[in-house]
Image: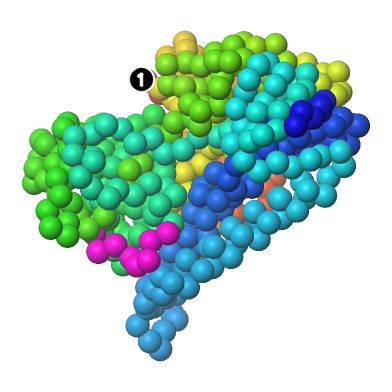
Amino acid sequence: MTRAFDAIIIGAGQAGPSLAVRLGRAGMRVALIERQLFGGTCVNTGCTPTKALVASAYAAHLAHRSAEFGVNLAEPVNVDWTRVRQRQEEIVRRSRDSVESWVRGADNCTVYRGHARLQSTQQVRIGEDLLTAARVFLNVGARARVPPLPGIEQINYLTNSRILKLDSLPRHLVVIGGSYVGLEFAQIFRRFGCQVTVVEMNSRLIHREDLEISDAVRAIMEAEGIEVRMEAECIRFERMSAQTCVHVACRTGEPAVLGSHVLLAVGRQPNTDDLGLDQAGVEVDDHGYIKVDDELRTSAHGIWALGECNGRGAFTHTSYNDYEIVASNLLDGERRSVLDRILAYALFTDPPLGRAGLTEAEARARGHQVLVGSRPMTRVARAIEKGETQGLMKVIVDRGTRQILGAAILGTGGDEAIHSVLDTMYARAPYTMLQRAVHIHPTVSELIPTVLGELKSSSA
């Protein structure tokens, strides 16, 4: 059967449902196609379940520390993994069901379940149905990358989605990858009582961050008993009875790690290999990401790509912003662009890292003359009162323009406090505006003006 629409949206992640509702309200007939779960990675295997686990892990950690706060627990602390899983699954289910019911009840929107494939720039095949539209939007997301490491076929490895379905806690979890996803899971399962080892090929964790941030994160991990193995030059796997031997060939320490479970956290790959993109002339890069211009148009007329599959942002908030850009340009007569966006993200360990804009190293590489302000969390009253003094605050400013170039807040509340810096950057205001703001005491944010008042020249 052939059915005609004004717009076809493939994928119900963060951008797809919002775009479907907005276009439908504008009077367009919309087809939304989803082959698996509504809500995409964020709701089902990303932000929502992992942050629910982070909350449970924090509760366990705080319970173990309760005596520091003058609270004596009557019984030893133990983690009920079954209940932890049930809690996060309930949260995920509510969120997913909410997205699906919202879209199914939207004006002028028809929902299809199944695998969509492009047959031309204006034709999409789903089962026996052929859908046509002058506009097609791809919001197909990405999945965990599984690199062809030697011995990978011998082991039952975990990914960010598979680890959520474990029936019991690992005895010893070996995390391959010392970046954002890997570190969050490492700390979660360590706080649940598991032995954890992180294996990283680079010389430091989250290596794109400035050195002092990277070093501080490693110190936080190791203080909780997580073993960190850096400069793993030749990672390979070998099955040994009920265990997995991870050969790391590091310069120091044992040459191999024996674990009960292995988590691969070494990046993502887009879900673009089975969409029939070539049938519509949609170009991809060497990694499979769909090439788009700054307004998210692909190489094929009438086709846009939004979210993680376009390689222009790997976060829920950038995916949603993709929707905002496309909707504003199509319906409001605007010319919004991804170039208007300031990079911002967080590492949701405890304490979290909130990041906005450039690192100091990036700012210098771009030719900026920088001023840097920094303060350890040991000198932040709110952190002291909460007994959470790990980390530091750092702000980078251009000496000539007085514009804030970037900031990092690694510490309690850092994922929230970073937004006052980010908003100042979006306002294109000089740092002095934020420096003169009067923030509430006692908060983490109140120290940002103080840090800006202590800016200094810093040699590379």
The amino acid on which the numbered mark 1 sits, given as a three-letter code, is Ala
Numbered range of the magenta stretch: 165-172
**Residue 243 appears at what percent x and percent y?**
17, 56
Q: In this view, does 408 lie to the left or right of 240?
A: right
For the point 81% across and 21% down, which residue is it?
330
The answer to whether residue 109 of the structure is visible from this angle is: yes
**Residue 40 appears at what percent x and percent y?**
59, 43
Relative to residue 60, is residue 445 depicted above or below? Answer: above
For the point 48% across and 26% down, which residue is it?
273
Where is the C terminus found, in terms of image quarters? Answer: top left
Location of mark 1 (residue): 460
Relative to residue 62, is residue 319 depicted above or below? Answer: above
Q: Nearer the viewer, residue 212 or 263?
A: 263
Q: Nearer the viewer, residue 424 or 59?
A: 59
For the point 83% across and 45% down, which residue is it?
106
Q: How many marks?
A: 1
Question: In which quadrant of the rendered view does residue 170 lie?
Answer: bottom left
**Residue 121 appears at what percent x and percent y?**
68, 16
**Residue 201 appears at what percent x and percent y?**
24, 33
Q: In this view, does 50 lie to the left or right of 234?
A: right
